[in-house]
Amino acid sequence: MADVNTIRSGVRSGVADIDAGLRAHMNKVYGQMSIGMLITALAAWAIAGLAVTSDPSAAALNAEGQIMALREGTFLTGLGSLLYASPLQYVVMFAPLAFLLFGWGALMSRGSAAAVQLGFFIFAAVMGISMSSIFLVYTPYSITQTFLVTAIAFAGLSLYGYTTKKDLSGMGTFLMMGVIGLIIAMVINMFLQSGPMGYAIAAIGVLIFSGLTAYYTQDIKRTYVAHAHHGDQEWLDKAASDGALSLYISFLNMFQFLLMFMGQQE
C-alpha cells in the first residue's frame, strides 16, 4: 500500500514543477513579446526616417512634382511617397491583417517552434512599417508618453489576468465580437471621416483591448497548465509564440487608440 506521505510529497512536487514551468513559460511569452515590440519600434522609426526629408533642395523637387510636401519645410522622399501616397499604402496597411487571417494559423499547425517564432518577428517588422506613419503625424514626445502610459496599463491588466481567480473565458467571446464590430466601424469611418465617431471608436477600442489583455493572459496561463503534463515542449514553445502575438496585438491596439486621445500632432 502506498505511503500517504509519499503520495502527498509527489503531489506537492508535481505542483511545484507546474509552477516553475509556468513561470518560465510566461517569461518566454513576455520576452518574445518585448523583442517583437522592439523590432516594431525600430522598423517604424527607421522607415519614418527614410520617408521624410527637410533638405532645402527637396523644395525644388516638390515644385517639379517629383516628391510631395508633408508640411512646410518637410517633404516625403521617394520611399515616403511610395509608402504613404500610392496604392502600395493599402498593401502596407492590410498586410499584417492578411497575415493574421491567412498565414498565422497555417504556420502554427505546420511550422516548427523556431519557424513560428521567426514568423512572429517578421510580422512585428511588417507591423513596424505599417505603423511608421505615426512619426509623420504625432510628435516624438507624445508617442513616447503614450507608449509609457500604455505599458503601465498593460502591466496592470496582464497582472490582473494572471492573478485573478475569476474565470474570464466568457468575456473573451464577447470581446472578440466587439473587435469585429470595431473593425466594421473603422472601415465605415474611413469614408465618413467623422471626428466624433473616430473618438468613440478609440474609446471603445481602448476598453476592448484592455479586456483582451487580461483575458489573453489568463488564457495563456490556463493553456499551459492544461497541457504541461503532456511533456510536448515543441507545442509549448509554439504556444508561447502564439501567446506573445496575442498580447503584442492587444498592446499595440491599446497604444494606437490611446494615441488618438493623447497624441499631439506635428
Image: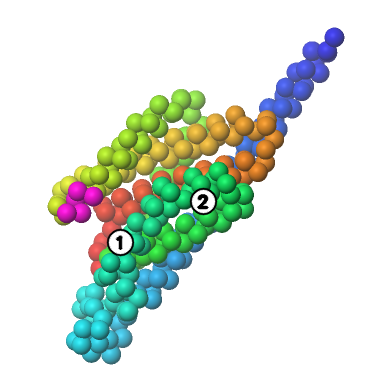
Q: Residue at x 58, y 49 (%)?
A: 111
In the image, 191: left or right of 55? left
In the image, 212: left or right of 32? left
Asked if residue 235 is among those painted magenta in the image, a careful observer would answer: no
Residue identifier under label 2 = 33
Q: Which residues are magenta?
A: 187-191
**Depth order, front residue of 90/257:** 90
Does the magenta stretch mainly form a helix, a strand or a loop?
Answer: helix
Give the image location of residue 76, x and y in percent.
29, 77
Q: CA distance from mark 1 to mark 2?
A: 26 Å
Residue identifier under label 1 = 90
**Depth order, front residue of 61/24:** 61
Give the image location of residue 160, x and y in percent.
46, 35
Which quadrant does the N terminus fall into?
top right
**Which residue type does callout 2 highlight?**
Met
> What crowding class fits label 2: few (fewer than 14 Cα within 10 Å), some (14-19), or many (20 or more)?
many
The residue sitting at the top extreme is 1
Q: Is residue 126 above or below residue 231?
A: below
Q: Is residue 207 above or below residue 99?
A: above
The mark that comes first in sequence, 1 or 2, is 2
